[in-house]
Image (spheres, helix red, strand yellow):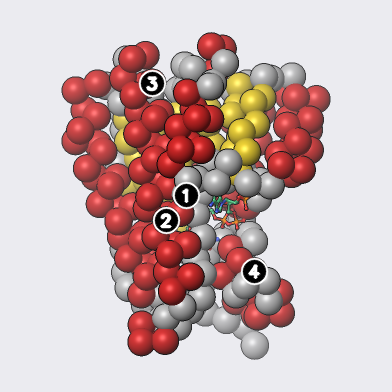
């Protein structure tokens, strides 16, 4: 079995690729940071004795995505599971003060990048007559919250695409699922706040957030259900979080 995980250099994607490898899957790991990919590939190969292919590309660049997938070695073309994880939030501002670069990055990565890779891999899955696409959405795709505007819109798009893909791929026997997490402590907030680590730490101060491993567990559980079972959609929150903005903090 083969799993391709986008955004496997950090956080949820990295933990997910590791869990699939631990369960004997060969894995394709992607991201833009070549050094991290190389190091992670060595670790997975050595620890789990599985085949690992690392692909370094920017998911926002359609030609790069197409080239990387078209050049997959034969042994990696039978992708069983695609985890559409690569994504980010950039900024947290009211709509009228939005930073255009932040908007473009979120829309190009979370929506267009997810579409580019899905187009390539779904065609391989159709040829192989099997497959499972697991989309990483967010609680931000289920609710809008103050200053979350464009990030929330991008994750609402993932929610809609999750439903649409399931309809279009139904005749081909391809399963489509989504996991929508609340707060998970990864590099997410450091990226959101343009590298401001102190501000990022405050997001998780006084709470027990989810971990990347919690989400990896959920994704692997979805993928490992019997072939006739499809988990359509899961919202997963830390116990201290009731919705996008209601969080119980210890002072
Ligand atoms: P991280 O910042 O830790 O990981 C993000 C991953 O996405 C990295 O591997 C990064 O790789 C990759 N990525 C980002 N931009 C690109 C790009 N242009 N091309 C290729 N790869 C890219 O964050 P998380 O693990 O938390 O985020 C993973 C997913 O989970 C995202 O879709 C996020 O929206 C979602 N999510 C996160 C939550 C949280 O609270 N953390 C909650 C709900 C959903 P590289 O930089 O090497 O390219
Ligand atoms: C990440 C969770 O609440 O920051 O998608 O939007 S949140």
Looking at marks 2 and 1 on the same chain, the residue that comes earlier in the sequence is marked by: 1
Ligand 1 within 8 Å, label 2 CB? yes
Q: Is label 4 or label 1 in front?
A: 1
Residues at marks 2 and 1 touching, judged by CB atoms closer than 8 Å: yes
Secondary structure at badge 4 equals helix
Q: Quadrant of ligand 1?
A: bottom right
Give the Cα distance between marks 3 and 2: 23 Å
Establish if 151 lies above or below 80: below
Q: Residue 192 occupies which quadrant of the picture?
A: bottom right
Q: Residue at x 46, y 78 (%)?
A: 99
Q: Is label 1 or label 3 in front?
A: 1
What numbered label is drawn on residue 108?
2
Question: Dot 2, crowdedness within 10 Å: few (<14), some or many (≥20)?
Answer: some
Residue 241 in percent (x, y) is at 47, 71
Question: Dot 4, crowdedness within 10 Å: few (<14), some or many (≥20)?
Answer: some
Looking at marks 4 and 3 on the same chain, the residue that comes earlier in the sequence is marked by: 3
Looking at marks 1 and 3 on the same chain, the residue that comes earlier in the sequence is marked by: 1
Q: Is label 4 or label 3 in front?
A: 3
What numbered label is drawn on residue 124?
3
Secondary structure at badge 1 equals loop
Establish if 139 lies above or below 74: below
- For mark 1, what is the residue? 60
Give the Cα distance between marks 1 and 3: 20 Å
- For mark 4, what is the residue? 190
Q: Residue at x 69, y 47 (%)?
A: 33
Ligand 1 within 8 Å, label 1 CB? yes
Q: Residue at x 43, y 47 (%)?
A: 113
Residues at marks 2 and 4 touching, judged by CB atoms closer than 8 Å: no
């Amino acid at each position: 079995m083969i799993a391709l995980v986008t955004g496997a250099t950090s956080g949820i994607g990295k933990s997910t690729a590791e869990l699939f490898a631990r369960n004997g899957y060969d894995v394709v790991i992607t991201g833009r940071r070549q050094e991290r990919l190389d190091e992670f590939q060595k670790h997975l190969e050595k620890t789990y004795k599985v085949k690992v292919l690392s692909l370094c590309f920017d998911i926002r660049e359609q030609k790069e995505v197409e080239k990387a997938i078209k050049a997959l070695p034969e042994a990696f073309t039978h992708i069983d599971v695609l985890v559409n994880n690569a994504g980010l939030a950039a900024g947290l501002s009211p709509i009228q003060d939005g930073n255009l670069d932040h908007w473009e990055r979120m829309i190009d990565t979370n929506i267009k990048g997810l579409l580019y890779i899905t187009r390539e891999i779904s065609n391989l899955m159709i040829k192989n007559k099997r497959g499972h696409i697991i989309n990483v959405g967010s609680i931000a795709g289920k609710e809008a919250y103050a200053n979350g505007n464009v990030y929330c819109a991008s994750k609402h798009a993932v929610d809609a695409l999750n439903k649409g893909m399931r309809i279009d791929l139904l005749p081909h026997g391809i399963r489509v699922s989504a996991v929508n997490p609340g707060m998970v402590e990864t590099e997410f907030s450091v990226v959101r706040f343009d590298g401001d680590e102190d501000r990022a730490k405050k997001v998780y101060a006084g709470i027990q957030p989810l971990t990347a491993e919690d989400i990896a567990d959920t994704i692997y559980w979805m993928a490992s259900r019997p072939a006739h079972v499809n988990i359509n959609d899961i919202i997963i929150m830390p116990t201290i979080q009731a919705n996008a903005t209601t969080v119980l903090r210890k002072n």
